[in-house]
Image (cartoon, rainbow, N blue to C red):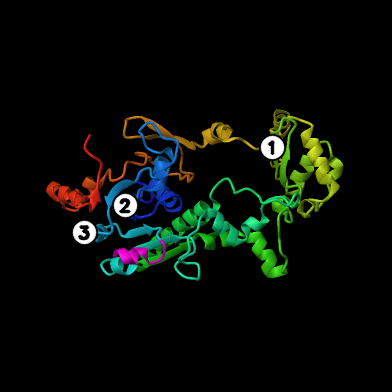
Amino acid sequence: MSAPLQTLKILDFSTLLPGPFASMMLADLGADVIRIEAPNRPDLTRLLPPIAEDGQSAQHGLLNRSKRSLGLNLKTPEAVQIVKQLVASGYDIVLEQFRPGVMDRLGVGYEALHAGCPTLIFCSLTGYGQSGPLKDRAGHDLNYLALSGLLSLYGRSQPAQPPPPLPTQVADIGAGSLHLVIGLLAAVIRRQTTGEGSRVDIAMHDGALAWNVFGATKWLVANEQPGPETEILNGGSFYDLYETKDGRLLSVGSLEPQFWQGFCQAIGHEELFAPGMNFEVTNQQSFKAQIRAAILAKTLAEWQAIFTALDVCVEPVLTTEEALNHPQTQARGMVVDVPMDNGRCQKQVANPIKMSDHTPNYPFTGVVLGAHTQEILSSLGYTAAQIEALAAQEVVAYPPTK
């Protein structure tokens, strides 16, 4: 079966997490992705532990699997010419993650590339977008979540202490990477029907703000300011985490009446059930304390024995090891073996998109910088002597021959 995105040819200029995660998902689905990397400014994910058996960062190996690497010094005119040749040869989708204006200054911005390729799709992923007073400001996941209002809904109201950062990069991946994939594919579909390219502008702050569904609605419509533990889904109701006798945690999400009633029966407090109570903010009411006391009376294993047989939206809080070894994870094929260049395999989390006629293919993990430079330039017609000369001039880079 053909891969769903096998016709897409992408030049990826991004680094770190958001852009590479997006292009990883596209590569998993068959897109031909060339990652453009600066030889003198390596992606910091290459330095992150743990280090896999091939000597490469496992984080880098995951985020950049199935992508070819082209070591290219964009501050040289020869490198700019190579980019334009790649676009002309069919790599007519560009993904970049620089601050606004950087690609223009390098000579490979939207206008420069669009002039030679009217069907170009040029996707920019930044913290604050291509416009607005913060467009040139640096930021990270935590900053975008802070300015989106989402962090103001996170944490406990008592004691009033700052909550810790979230355990994953919600703005980077959720609000950035996934919106970029959606925007890019929307531009591809539009191009198929109109023959026109697009410029796609994705801001992680915009995405995080859009994800503030409940808080924003409450303010915009009811003029009410939400906060920690003030809403149904952020600890203001029984929808919460509860400690067990052995110090583990149980997640209780029994929102619908039938689930809420079944949960109350399971913990021996059927009297707590009342129609409509599941949608009330009840953090300060005594019955939540009764739930805590009931859950604290048994170990996690004891509760699992009870709730495994019930369909009431209650699950244990698993460790990463437990989550990866969980039967559901295994049944869905969410851990895969991806080949490394040393002939062995690295275990990675799989692409979560399931399709009836396609299984994602993972030909190789992220490679050393410039691993495919010679191959790519040869496909453009460069001779071995020309490639060697470009390397001597520090225009391109590739690893030494083993």
Residue 153 or residue 41, whichever sits in front: 41
Does 152 sit above or below residue 366? below
Q: Which residue is mark 1?
A: 249
Left or right of residue 11: residue 136? right
Which numbered disc flags the more N-terminal residue, 3 or 2? 2
Check residue 38 in the rendering and tell me which mark sits there, or answer none. Answer: 2
**Which image quarter: residue 11?**
bottom left
Q: Label 2 near label 3: C-beta < 8 Å?
A: no
The location of residue 265, given as percent across then percent down, is 81, 38
Left or right of residue 217: residue 125? left
The location of residue 297, given as percent across then percent down, is 79, 32
Does 374 sit above or below residue 322? below
Q: Amino acid at mark 1?
A: Leu
Does residue 68 appear in the picture of this structure?
yes
Magenta stretch holds residue 101: yes
| Magenta span | 99-107
Check residue 78 in the rendering and tell me which mark sits there, or answer none. Answer: 3
Does residue 118 appear in the picture of this structure?
no
Check residue 257 in the rendering and tell me which mark sits there, or answer none. Answer: none
The location of residue 260, given as percent across then percent down, is 77, 45
The location of residue 359, given as percent across then percent down, is 42, 41
